[in-house]
Every structure is written in C-alpha cells, then in structure tokens.
Image (cartoon, helix red, strand yellow):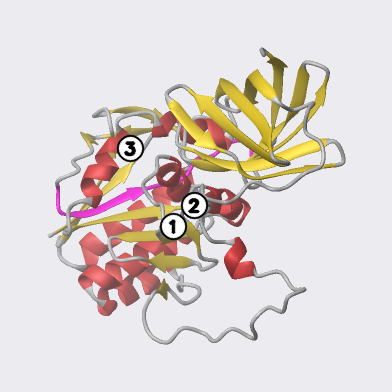
Amino acid sequence: MLTVQIVLYDGFDLLDAIAPYEVFCAAAMKAENEASVQFVTAEGPRSVASGFNGLKIEASGRLNPECAGIILVPGAAGDVEADGPDSIPAILNRAMNTELTGMIRQALGHKDIVIATVCGGSLLLAMGGLLEGRPAVTHHLGMDVLGATGAIPVPARVVDDGNLVSGGGVTSGLDVALYLVERELGPRIAHAIEQLFEFERRGTVWRETGMAPRSHKAPTQDEPNIAADQTPMTYDTPPVPIMQTSVFDGNWDTTIATPVGKLPVKLSISTSHGMIQGQATQGEETVEFVTPVLQNNKLTWSLSITKPMRLHLKFEVAVNGDQMVGIAKAGILPASKLTGNRVS
C-alpha cells in the first residue's frame, strides 16, 4: 500500500495541501484502497491554521519519518513583499525551526521514502540545509532564494530528483501528486484521476537523465559566464585589490533587521598589501567575506550562512566615521537593513 503523509504547519498554503490530498484520495478510490493519505504535523494531532484567513484543518497524526511512502510538504501563504511576522519567509522560518527539519532529514535517509514539495515547501527544506546541491523548483518568485540556499533551481513545472520531487507554484500540487501516482501506482490510475478531475498535467517532468541540451556557444572574454555565475560560492576566492579602505578597517558590532528578527553580527575588516579581507561572526559561526569590492565609497561582499537559515547573502555597506549602514540581501527576499558601530 502507498502511504502518503501531507505535513501541515501554522501558515501553510491551503491549495498546496488540499489539491494533493484530493488526488491521493482519488488514487485510493481508483486503486481499490492501495493508497492511504492523512494530514500530519511534526507535533502530532492538532488543529492547524492556514495562512491568510487562518482556515483550520485537523491533522490526525504525527509525522512518521520512518514510514515508507510519500511525505509531502506544502508551501506557506502570506505576504510576499513585506518583512513582518506574516510574511512568507517568516512563516517558513518558524516551521523550519520546529522538529520538522530534523524529521525530513531523517526521512531523506530512507531509500523507500519520497519527499515531495509544493511551491514554498522546497524553500522550507532548503532553508534548513536539506537541499544543498540538489535540483529543485519552487514558485517563480522564490527561485533566486532557492538558489541562494545552495540548491540548484530548475525552471520546470515538476522536478524529479529520485527521492525528492518538487513542484513550482501553488497549482503545481496537482501535477506533483498526479506524477507521483503515475510513478508509484501506474499511468492508468493517474489517467483515471485526470479524467475524474478534468485536469491534465502541464509540462515535462525534469529529470537528470538522457542527453543534456547543447549550449549555444561558449562565452567570449567580454561576455558573462552564466553557468559559472550559478556555481556555489566558495571561501578560497582571493581578496580584491583596492586603493583605499581605511574607513572600513576595524572591528564592527552590527545588527541585521531580518524578517525573522534582529541578528547581531560581528564584522572584522582589514587591509593588507592593498587587499581587503573580512570575516563575519554570528553566534558560533564565522565565515570569510567572498569577493569584497570597494566601489563608489561602498563596500560589497558575499558570504554563506547556516543560521538562522541556510542562505548565500550579498552585502552592501557604507561608513560615516564610526557608523556603518547598509543592507543584506538574498535573492528576491526584502533587503534587510544593517547598522553598526566600530568597536576598534
């Protein structure tokens, strides 16, 4: 029997969860009860409020990360551009900081369990560090953020990476569920459900098999290398030569006002032989600046963090005396304001 667990958390998107639920229920009916589906949470049976209007759905069980079958994680419903507690990043971050992340990590270690995501569900997993280096898709507005977590964004309706199957925007929940029904129970059951729902799956499911498409041409010296730009950032990039950095040199106590709260970050910036270098420390995590550049009296750099979520951030700051102001940004997430003071 195919067992399906659909995970609910406070602020989940209704359509992300309900559409797959109906597909799998129809599969159980068409396959003579060879499938079962239930709503679960990381905490156990409870009433769970969805995003926006807070419609409540009853989850009947606790997620079992060792149960063979499918675990489906929906996205969140909230403000897309705002940075308050009702924003999608804030909702996903709260869900990520529950037992759910550890449970999904445990489930990914079982070869007989498939993790499926719809829309922002892949972001929830990626922000918890579970999708680094793996191809996946999310809502088109979140693809830059997905890439900023270290995942490999693929602009497809559904992406199949073996034990990870992800879907794009909210309506892709139908496509993900129907594809999984076909994969696990066969095409005739999936076709019968399509006829029942009067719905046909969209697009080609992306899988890393078969021939790869040929690139049009190699980039010339004057053209950007897009493929290289999309590779994960590393820490062994040599510092960039600059003319003057004395205003940035020193140790700084800064605060970044993020959608998930204020983060204290210590910066250490120095110049040696015309090269600028830096480190950022947040909690027990210290990372090196990547490609620091001084231009037009502003210092920019990139770095990767793992707390409070896994992201590749880009910074831009300016200094006035012993005061530092600037922004930190990941993909299309709203820029977070950085402020700080020089301490030495």
Q: Nearer the viewer, mark 3 or mark 2?
A: 3
Q: Residue furthest right?
A: 296
Is residue 308 visible to us here? no
Which residue is label 3 attached to? 101
Which quadrant of the figure has residue 219?
Answer: bottom right
Gap between marks 3 and 1 measured at Cα: 21 Å
Magenta stretch containing residue 79, yes or no? yes
Q: How many marks?
A: 3
Q: Quadrant of the N terminus?
A: bottom left
The mark that comes first in sequence, 3 or 1, is: 3
The mark that comes first in sequence, 1 or 2, is: 2
* Residue interval drawn in magenta: 67-82
Badge 2 amino acid: Cys
Q: Position of residue 196 (x, y in %)?
A: 37, 69
Q: Residues within 10 Å of mark 2 (few under 14, many from 20)?
A: many
In terms of secondary structure, where does tag 2 sit? loop
> In the picture provided, is 250 more to the left or to the right than 117?
right
Which residue is label 1 attached to? 173
Q: Quadrant of the C terminus?
A: top right
Q: Position of residue 311 (x, y in %)?
A: 52, 42
